[in-house]
Structure formats: C-alpha cells, structure tokens
Amino acid sequence: MKTSLVIVLSIAFSFHFYESNAASRMFLEATQDPQEDLSETWCNKTSDIDHCINSNQADPRSDLKESRIGLTIIITEVAKSNASETLTKIDKLISTEKDRAILSMLYSCDQKYQNAFGDLDSALHFLNETKLNVQNLDRKHYEAINQELAAAAGEVNYCQSFYRGPRPSPLADENGKFLEINDVALQLLNLIECDKFEPCRDS
Ligand SMILES: *[C@@H]1O[C@H](CO)[C@@H](O)[C@H](O)[C@H]1NC(C)=O
Ligand SMILES: *[C@@H]1O[C@H](CO)[C@@H](O)[C@H](O)[C@H]1NC(C)=O
Ligand SMILES: *[C@@H]1O[C@H](CO)[C@@H](O)[C@H](O)[C@H]1NC(C)=O
C-alpha cells in the first residue's frame, strides 16, 4: 500500500518535473508533430545539423517532411538552387573580370556548375521515383542517386582545384557551401540505405 503510494507520488512528481523541463517540452512537441521530429532526428546525424534542420523547416511541403526520402529531396533541391545561384554569380563575375587566367577558370567553373545542376536534376528524378513508386529505397535507386550526388560534388571539386592563383579563388566560398549542403544530401541517403553516414558498401 505504502509502496504504491510512493510510486504514484513519484510519477506525479516526474510529470511535474518533466513539464518544466525544456528538453522534455521539446520532446512533447516533437511527438505531437512527427514531421519536426523526423528532420531533427535525421539532420542530427549529418555534418551540417543547423543548415539541414533549417532548410527542412523552411520548406512548406509537409508531405515531403513525412519521410527520410522527402527530407533528402528537400536538401537536394537546396543544393540545386544553390548551384543555380552560383551560376548567376559566375556570370556576373565573367562580365567584369579582366584577368585572363581567372576568366578562363570562371568559364570552366560555369561548365562544371551546369553539369552539377544536371546531376542534381537526375538525382531528383530518381528520388522522386523512389518516393512515388518504390517506397523503400532499393539498392538500384540508392546507387543511382548516390552516383549523381557524388558526380555533382566531383564537378564542384574540380572547379575548386582548377584555380591556382595568388589570391583565393573568387568561388572558394560558393564551392565550400555547395559541397557542404550536397554532402548532407549524400549523408541522408547513406543513413536511409545502410544506417550510417558514410557511403554504403556492398557486403
Ligand atoms: C542529437 O544527437 C545528440 C548526440 O548524438 C543526442 O544527444 C541528441 O539526443 C540528438 N537529438 C535528437 C533530436 O535526436
Ligand atoms: C548558396 O550559395 C550562396 C552563394 O552562391 C551562399 O551565399 C548561400 O549561403 C548558399 N545557400 C545555401 C543554402 O547553401
Ligand atoms: C519531382 O517531383 C516534383 C513534384 O512532386 C516535381 O515538381 C519536380 O519537377 C520533380 N523533379 C524531377 C527532377 O523529376
């Protein structure tokens, strides 16, 4: 009798305690809103947690936030629009640059970013297909999406390595930011397929 009273009291006390605890309030909200919970849980496992969570929360499409593939679609679209922003910036730089070595680098990077944009579009095509038809990511789709995202990173890495100048590349910042967000898309994909951040290997 006494024991159960103690249990009742401690449960009541725990509830009271947890109610005033910020972390638990977050937990309660997350349970009420599974969409937020998903992005916080999965973005938390990536290399750019804030950017990942903010991008997902800023996206109005609630249907995409219900699945990890949906989250990966949102991040891949962010990377794609980032490539597009950088293309606009490159065009602007080309119109004013006088240094021929830098101009040549800019033209080359313009091509690389166009390729990256195309790679991300293909990745999105496969991601869409996965979301609509396959439900669970199958190995074939994993490989295809992984390949496109890695190819996009390769293009931008090439743009970065192409420049050897006395001052830093005028695209160093853009390249870094693109690679960061593109990596998050790759990591989310790996987490879905093999529950780890690194590329999945055939067993
Ligand atoms: C995020 O990760 C940290 C450390 O790995 C963990 O303690 C925390 O509970 C995680 N948060 C969420 C929302 O998953
Ligand atoms: C996209 O690129 C621009 C520069 O091109 C950068 O300032 C911005 O932070 C990037 N956005 C994201 C979401 O990475
Ligand atoms: C993916 O699907 C969305 C609609 O769900 C569509 O707007 C978008 O164009 C598609 N993207 C590709 C590359 O197929």
Image (cartoon, rainbow, N blue to C red):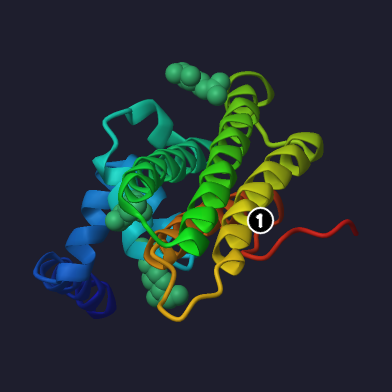
Q: Is residue 102 above or below residue 111?
A: below
Residue 43 spot, x, y in % from top left: 43, 58
What residue is disc 1 on? 154
Q: Residue furthest right?
A: 203
Q: Is residue 178 above or below residue 126?
A: below
Instruction: Residue 91: name its quadrant.
Output: top left
Residue 84 spot, x, y in % from top left: 41, 38
Seen at 80% across and 40% down, the residue is 139
Residue 44 spot, x, y in % from top left: 42, 64
Seen at 54% across and 54% down, the residue is 104
Seen at 53% across and 51% down, the residue is 109
| Quadrant assignment for the N terminus | bottom left
Amino acid marked by disc 1:
Gly
Q: Is residue 197 above or below residue 122?
A: below
Residue 179 spot, x, y in % from top left: 51, 60
Instruction: Residue 34: name its quadrant.
Output: top left
Seen at 10% across and 68% down, the residue is 16
Image quarter where ligand 1 lies:
bottom left
Q: Is residue 23 above or below residue 193?
A: below
Q: Residues within 10 Å of mark 1 (few under 14, many from 20)?
A: some
> Helix or strand or loop: what does disc 1 sit on?
helix
**Would you say 130 lies left or right of 14 here?**
right
| Quadrant assignment for the C terminus | bottom right
Instruction: Residue 2: name its quadrant.
Output: bottom left
**Camera sees residue 10:** yes
**Would you say 72 lies left or right of 129 here?**
left
